[in-house]
Image: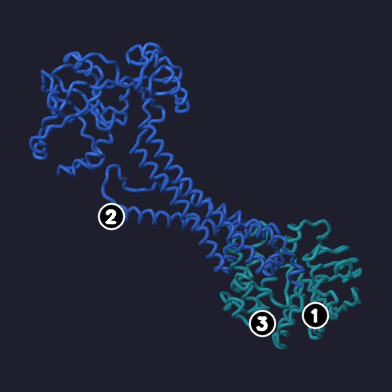
């Protein structure tokens, strides 16, 4: 579950303070898929990064999988992201020098006090199989299509069996058919008990969500 | 995070950025190779110089003064009284007298069985010195004795260890006689001598005695072109041939420690004696030259390691700057700033260790090549070492550890930069 209460965040442009989030309250329950829509620059991605403990420079309260971010050390926040949060980005953000399998292995490798490399490799192989890419395990991202890359990113996000999945414009770089397949996958994951929060400006994504919230002038409506 | 996982992460990072990794590895390899080779060269040449000039830092050679005021200052003659006074100096552990044999001694023919190699009609005039048995006791062959055996018996003698090397490399090839097998010491070899006989006209004594000498050991404390006899034998021969007692030729003092030698030398000079520092000075000069050259080369190698560290720092910094997005992704999937920092440091360490191992091996190969080349190009002069390099095990460790440490030092700043990447800002 994700819970945000009274979250405020500003950026500074020299002396000027530009508010981005103005007292945002949000709760995404397990099994729910929530879409955040809004114009470009409205702070959707910022909200997502705050909700995923990636951006901790804010006022208010954020709780991820029952853990409050207040007073969490950088190492503890990293461990929380590793354990409870899966990220899917519009630009996929795969590491170009690694194979698809190695990209998927990363959360397992980074797990504090984690499992053996062989075990992580085996689970990453299963995760790739789960997104239908077992045969592309040794391929580098440059050799994968956009849809394949996003499926690798999803496999990576799910490797640590998170309770929260955060997606930033996940279909933004995909064609219609591939985008639909990814949306279906998100819906399936939400049905499986994950809290899915998707930031999008695409109608097809918001249609698939159980709840759609609009972020405008720093407030959710 | 497990250490193996950290190494996996660093290795995959290096593989992804292999061009930079290779350049950094080459820098570390160059530093390691230079350091290992130069230190090995210094040790090797130093060892060869010590074999050539085996000076004992605790020895002080006391000789009568060139100009003496004699009894006025208590100096002058090196007799038993002077020897006692020298022994009483506070820093002295032992004082051993030497007495030059003033009766001519010659080798008229070779030992039995070596006649074929002996140039016809050749007689060798051999300078001989009597030494106190204690001075060379540590160098005696097993079960051998070095004291006066009386007339009619083979006189025990000791030779300089270096003389055998000169025999092997100079006399043997010149005379066409066989060289001694490596490591072989002809202990017990008996050589006929004529006591009282000189090849210099008019110097032969009225009585010439046929005798034998028997080799009982080799010692660096015996002057190089001299045969050492027990000092009592020299005294006996002087008495037999009516030679006047002129006192000792030299007294060798063994100081309690090398640090006390300068003070001891000053005390000896205050007593009115001179100190023969020619051997020690030569050894010290060679030692200084070797130490200074080695120091300069090692400084150069350390500078190369420092430059390698700078190159690695620059290259890793550029790599970190170019990979901020990847670092942010790692943070998004659970890497803490500490893990990111450790990953870059491990990358530096891996580059340093692999470059260091490659460099140390390269140095070993280069030394083998250089030795082969010198063996082919340089003549076989006395004391020429088989190798000009020495590779003790610690040198390999040093050759790897220093470039690795330099690489880790070079990785410190880039690691800090990487750890401070703001993932939210970078991924936005």
> Which of the chains is cyan?
A
Residue B420's place in the image compared with A173, above or below, is above
The tint of chain B in the picture is: blue
User: Which chain letter matches label 1?
Assistant: A
Do the residues indicated by labels 3 and 2 lie within the same chain of the protein?
A: no
> Residue at (68%, 78%) from the top-left corner?
A150
Image position, residue B387 (x, y; %):
34, 48
Compared across the picture, whether B266 is left or right of A63 comes to left
> Residue at (86%, 77%) from the top-left corner?
A42
| CA–CA distance in space, label 3 to label 2 | 65 Å
Q: Secondary structure at mark 1?
A: loop
Which label belongs to residue B300? none
User: Which chain letter matches label 2?
Assistant: B
Q: Secondary structure at mark 3?
A: helix
- Report crowding for label 3: few under 14, some 14 to 19, many 20 or more residues within 10 A (C-alpha): some
Compared across the picture, whether B271 is left or right of A129 comes to left
Image position, residue A163 (x, y; %):
76, 68
Residue placed under numbered mark 2 in the picture? B376
Contact check, label 3 and label 2, Cβ < 8 Å:
no
- Report crowding for label 1: few under 14, some 14 to 19, many 20 or more residues within 10 A (C-alpha): many
| Numbered disc in front, either 1 or 2 | 2
Which label belongs to residue A146? 3
Which label belongs to residue A200? 1
| CA–CA distance in space, label 3 to label 1 | 17 Å
Q: Earlier in the sequence, mark 3 or mark 1?
A: 3
Residue B210's place in the image compared with B306, above or below, is above
Quadrant in which residue B215 is drawn = top left
């Amino acid at each position: 579950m994700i819970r945000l209460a009274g979250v405020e965040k500003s950026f500074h442009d020299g002396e000027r303070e530009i508010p981005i989030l103005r007292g945002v309250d949000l709760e995404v329950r397990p099994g729910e898929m929530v879409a955040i829509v809004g114009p470009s620059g409205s702070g959707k991605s910022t909200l997502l990064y705050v909700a995923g403990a990636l951006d901790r420079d804010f006022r208010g309260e954020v709780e991820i999988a029952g853990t409050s971010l207040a007073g969490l050390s950088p190492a503890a926040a990293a461990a929380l992201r590793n354990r409870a949060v899966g990220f899917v980005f519009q630009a996929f953000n795969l590491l170009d020098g690694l194979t698809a399998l190695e990209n998927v292995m990363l959360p397992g490798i980074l797990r504090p006090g984690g499992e053996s490399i062989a075990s992580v490799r085996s689970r990453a192989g299963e995760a790739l199989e789960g997104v239908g890419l077992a045969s592309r395990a040794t391929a580098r991202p440059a050799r994968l299509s956009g849809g394949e890359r996003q499926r690798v990113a999803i496999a990576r996000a799910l490797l640590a069996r998170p309770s929260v999945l955060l997606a930033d414009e996940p279909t933004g770089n995909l064609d219609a058919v591939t985008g639909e397949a990814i949306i279906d996958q998100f819906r399936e994951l939400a049905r499986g008990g994950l809290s899915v929060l998707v930031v999008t400006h695409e109608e097809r994504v918001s249609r698939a969500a159980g709840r759609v919230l609009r972020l405008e002038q720093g407030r959710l409506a | 995070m497990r250490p193996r996982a950290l190494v996996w992460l660093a290795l995959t990072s290096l593989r992804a950025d292999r061009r930079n990794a290779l350049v950094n590895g080459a820098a570390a390899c160059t530093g390691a190779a230079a350091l290992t080779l130069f230190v090995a060269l210094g040790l090797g040449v130093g060892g060869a110089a010590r074999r050539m000039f085996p000076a004992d830092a605790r020895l002080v050679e006391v000789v009568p003064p060139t100009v003496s005021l004699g009894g006025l200052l208590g100096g002058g003659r090196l007799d038993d009284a002077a020897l006692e006074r020298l022994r009483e100096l506070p820093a002295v552990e032992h004082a051993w007298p030497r007495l030059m044999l003033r009766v001519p001694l010659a080798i008229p023919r070779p030992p039995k069985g070596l006649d074929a190699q002996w140039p016809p009609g050749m007689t060798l005039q051999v300078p001989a010195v009597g030494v106190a048995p204690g001075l060379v006791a540590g160098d005696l062959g097993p079960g051998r004795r070095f004291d006066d055996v009386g007339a009619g018996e083979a006189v025990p003698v000791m030779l300089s260890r270096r003389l055998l090397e000169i025999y092997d490399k100079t006399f043997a090839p010149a005379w066409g006689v066989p060289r001694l097998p490596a490591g072989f010491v002809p202990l017990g070899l008996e050589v006929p001598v004529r006591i009282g006989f000189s090849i210099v006209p008019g110097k032969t004594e009225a009585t010439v005695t046929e005798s034998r000498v028997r080799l009982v050991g080799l010692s660096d404390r015996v002057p190089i072109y001299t045969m050492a006899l027990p000092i009592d034998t020299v005294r006996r021969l002087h008495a037999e041939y009516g030679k006047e007692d002129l006192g000792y030729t030299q007294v060798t003092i063994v100081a309690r420690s090398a640090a006390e030698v300068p003070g001891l030398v000053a005390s000896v000079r205050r007593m009115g004696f001179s100190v023969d520092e020619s051997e020690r000075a030569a050894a010290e000069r060679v030692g200084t030259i070797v130490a200074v050259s080695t120091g300069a080369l090692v400084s150069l190698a350390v500078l190369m390691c420092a430059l390698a560290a700078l190159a690695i720092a620059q290259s890793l910094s550029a790599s970190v700057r170019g990979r901020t997005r990847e670092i942010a992704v790692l943070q998004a999937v659970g890497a803490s700033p500490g893990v990111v920092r450790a990953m870059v440091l491990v990358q530096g360490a891996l580059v340093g260790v692999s470059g260091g191992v490659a460099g140390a091996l390269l140095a070993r190969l280069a030394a083998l090549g250089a030795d082969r080349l010198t063996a082919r190009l340089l003549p076989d002069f006395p004391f020429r070492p088989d190798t000009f390099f020495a590779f003790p095990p610690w040198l390999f460790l040093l050759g790897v550890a220093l470039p690795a440490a330099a690489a880790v030092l070079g990785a410190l700043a880039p690691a800090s930069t990487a750890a401070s990447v703001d993932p939210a800002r970078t991924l936005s």
